[in-house]
Amino acid sequence: MIMEEEIFRKSPPELKKAPNLQDYELMYGNFSQDFMEKELDYWEGKVNAAYNAIDRHAAGWRKNKIALHWAGERETADFTFLDLKEESDRFANLLVKCGVRKGDRVFIFLPRVPELYISFIGILKTGAIAGTMFSAFGPSAIKDRLKDSGAKCLITNSELKKRVDSVMGELPELKTVIVTDSVHSGDGVVSYSEAEKMPASYEIARMEPDDYAFMLYTSGTTGKPKGVMHCHKAVIHEHITAKWVLDIQDDDVYWCTADPGWVTGIAYEILGTWSNGATSVIYEGRFDPEKWYSIIEKYKVNVWYTAPTAIRMLMQAGDAYKKCNIGSLRHLCSVGEPLNPEAIRWGLKAFGLPFHDNWWQTETGGILIANYPVLDIKLGSMGKPFPGVTAAIVDDEGRILPQGAEGNLAIKPGWPSMMKAIWNNLPKYNEYFRNGWYISGDRARVDKDGYFWFIGRADDVIKTAGERVGPFEVESALIEHRAIAEAGVIGKPDALRGEIIKAFVKLRPGFSPSAELESEIKDYIKVKLAGHAYPREIAFVDSLPKTRSGKIMRRVLKARELGLPVGDLSTLEEY
Ligand code: ATP
Ligand code: MG
């Protein structure tokens, strides 16, 4: 079963601007690491990602350029590169005063406020390792991460601190809590305002390229979160992908909707994009279609990086986009989950632009497979490997499979932002590398033109009556049905067929569950996909379980269906 190929051809009117990467094939064929190195500033082989993201711009012509347009829930603020340099210097000085040293883990537990960004940069400047935690985490998720990492210092606000206090007794290594809105210091608590008294200059730690810079616990779609370690030189890959995939140019205003509690918010809100001197918009609030469109209008956003789940929610909000002037948009990108063709078609209607899907993982530290401004888009495909990246579809023994065959999506190790370790868990780290490949845990195929197609996470692929079916294809077909807003598909054990396909669907407003609708949907999929690929069971649901970063958690659907333990739920957003 292969998704029908629908191509969106790029022609000059769709490219509102000449892209940074003008010839993909040429660059892929001639790529060299030296070329990348020239994009970064080093001190005789030593490097610091924070210096490359902020300070080098503060020392040059971009110093008064806006780095951050911050749109808070109640107020707004703008920061130039020089502002961010000085504030992060002050914060780095405060950390040192608090006893933070190179290699210490310092965690940030804040909503998307300026202090989050400033402290992240400040931590890197000291040579300590920054960790982030999404602000919706509850006490046990916080405890797991702070305990596993042995964090010494935490930056939070007084509201979120209450959740930390309830588990403080189990965190003996946590010595200092810096509180953004506290005026008092003492008893292990330090007021963030102390940074104001510190000098606005700091001698940045000159790090080995392979020294750790930040760590992140993965979103836990499939299991217990693991601490993925990234080094300072990862910024080089984040920089060049921001330049060629996100196509950041100096006169652009860029908005990434991700939260730095996840890797996208670090690589493409802090490091790779600021390293390109981007003017970034950060919106503190939650998803709301009208608010989102008004942000685009207000800041005249040109480049927009978001996620399929958000796009599907915007689709459900219908033509809300018509209320705002969103004509500034010129380049749209998406990551985090497979991007359904229907979402691209809708984007074309709403914005006159296609969303460019790209694929990567917390472990990969940056984009590895992408659709590029200059290349045609095959709807439903993740695109082609980034220059310098070798991607392949391999079998379980590491043999490259022929074009069109489903297999493990694998990458040749050694790209600069590849994770360095899993914290305290060498066996887990080693599991990723087999037969000379980094095995992503995703299943995919590659077509004759070198485009990669996502099939599903290895654990999610369904085996029914001898056929393998990827949940993504079935879900994509389901949401093309007029009644369906969202869908999650699993394999349910079946004595006869091994597994049958079961779909959990959320209906669009105005539709209600009925036996007629159920059989209409089944017939629709039989015709659209294949006789064996239709869901034999359909459950109508009000919501789908998702991670807080918006990914559908199929393992939760499955565990609930089978009455099995659901496992770690720390990242679960909805019940
Ligand atoms: P865990 O590894 O803890 O289960 P996770 O895999 O959800 O969590 P992330 O690193 O945030 O954690 O997500 C990476 C995964 O998201 C990929 O392996 C893939 O399954 C999915 N993904 C990301 N981008 C895309 C994309 N463009 N198309 C399809 N899937 C994607
Ligand atoms: Mg994963």
Image: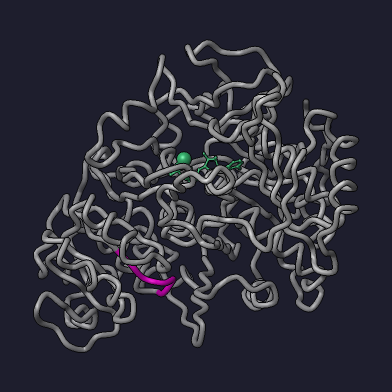
Residue farthest toward the front in the current orientation of the protein: 495
Q: Is any atom of residue 336 visible in this view?
A: no
Q: How many marks?
A: 0
Q: State the image coordinates of residue 277 (x, y, percent, origin top left).
A: 47, 59
Residue 232 falls in image quadrant: top left
Residue drawn 69% across the image and 44% down it: 373
Residue 299 falls in image quadrant: bottom right
Q: With 169 as the anchor, is 229 left or right in this view? A: right
Give the prevailing secondary structure in the magenta stretch.
loop
Residue drawn 61% across the image and 55% down it: 307
Q: State the image coordinates of residue 135 (x, y, percent, origin top left).
A: 40, 68
Q: State the image coordinates of residue 457 (x, y, percent, origin top left).
A: 56, 35
Residue drawn 21% across the image and 45% down it: 207
Q: With 359 as the anchor, is 529 left or right in this view? A: right
Residue 248 falls in image quadrant: bottom right
Q: Image quadrant for the N terminus?
A: top right
Q: Give the range drawn in magenta.
A: 108-113
Residue 217 vertical position relative to residue 532 in the rendered view, above or below = below
Residue drawn 10% across the image and 82% down it: 186
